[in-house]
Amino acid sequence: MRYAIAGTGTISAAGTDAGAQALTLRSGIPSWQIDETTGLPVYAVPILPPHPEIESFGEAHYLDRSSLLGLHAADQAVREAGWQGKDFAVIVGCSRGPTETWEASYANFAADGKPPVRTSPQTTLGSIAFAVAEYFGTGSLSSGVSVTCSSGFHALLHGIGLLGAGLADRVLVGGTEAPLTPFTLRQMEALRVYAPVPGRTTQAACRPFDSPPSGMVVGEGAAFLALERLVPRHRYAITGLGAARERAGSSTGISREGLALQQAMRQAVGGQDAMPDFVIAHAPGTARGDAAEREAINQVFPDSTPPVTSFKWATGHTFGASGPLALVAGLALLEGQEYLPLPHLAENIASLPGPNRFLVNATGFGGNAVSVLVGRN
């Protein structure tokens, strides 16, 4: 199984495009800030880049921030793929949906018993995918999926399914999330896994695999992939996929052994010929989540465990966008022939001899897990 990545786009606290994000990851300098309403550390996109077309479209259609972030990343991917003016399907993953609009609308309802007129169409999960499709003028299928923090990768699974079934020739897939709202942040704080404000501004608020665990920090962002059938001109391809679900007696549904992750990684890797040169872990910075993923990786690769990294120290946990964001960052490492270890851990591996493939994990509430193997064509 090989499907081409014809174009990518990304926006997060680490940068408003792939180049800026790569610079942040290489610098090791975090970009978190304190949320004024809750006092919690967050990873926010400080300023949306100038884009008159998106700005005009967003104002005309009263778009939620999740849709606006998605449009910025999607536009980058479409332009890189050369899809302007072409028809393509759109599948968007989002865990929380247009929650900023939902919360504001409910506040109005709670105050005077009347929600804004556009509340219903603007707060459906599908509104994000419909906005992306409308912006590009596509007439093919557009759909939204919500599978908690692996939503973006479930969009990718659906997109590859469309290509494989011959139901589409081009599919734009990805994830977007704008969860930096008081209600959402307080939900995460209530789980008692949220990180405190670091003692130093130079220290990352979220530090995956740190000891003791830092805790989770929420971020906002979006990332999209333009997928099509593979031909020789394509540089990068998705070469393996895995998805699984487990039934564990925990609030997240993830067992201590990370059984769903083990199954997903084994499916994606297949045989030893497809061994990844490094793994980009989901690793949200929580004690149980990080430990379960580390155990799963050790079980899948018992003889020669590949280097493991994560980029949530720079982006925070962007929920449904986290998988695609990590994948786009991984492509930058292949492009630069490099490997970037976690900056807060003392690791001996500073580089790899020409990495050719990597594995990305995403997990979420409900015990679901997705793994994607990406490599050079």
Image (cartoon, grey):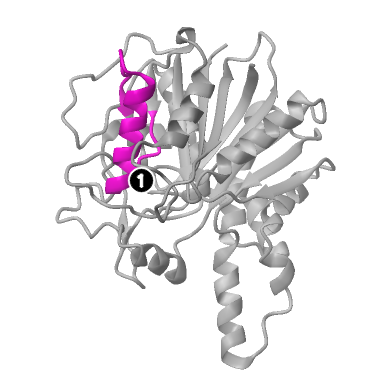
Extent of the magenta region: 280-308
Residue 36 placement: quadrant: bottom left
Left or right, 220 with respect to 198, comes to right
Q: Is residue 282 visible?
A: yes
Residue 21 drawn in magenta: no
On-image quarter of the N terminus: top right
On-image quarter of the C terminus: top right
Residue 332 placement: quadrant: top left
Q: Secondary structure at mark 1?
A: loop
**Residue in view at x 80 percent, y 45 percent:** 137
Front residue of 373/31: it is 373
**Residue in view at x 62 percent, y 85 percent:** 109
Residue 300 drawn in magenta: yes
Q: Position of residue 325 (x, y in %)?
A: 48, 38
How many other residues sit within 10 Å of disc 1, few (<14), some (14-19) or many (≥20)? many
Q: Is residue 132 visible?
A: no
Q: Which residue is mark 1?
A: 284
Front residue of 76/203: it is 203
Q: Is residue 196 above or below residue 352?
A: below
Q: Position of residue 221 (x, y in %)?
A: 49, 49
Q: Is residue 344 above or below residue 66?
A: above
Q: Among all residues in the image, which is located at the extreme right?
A: 139
Amino acid type, callout 1: Pro
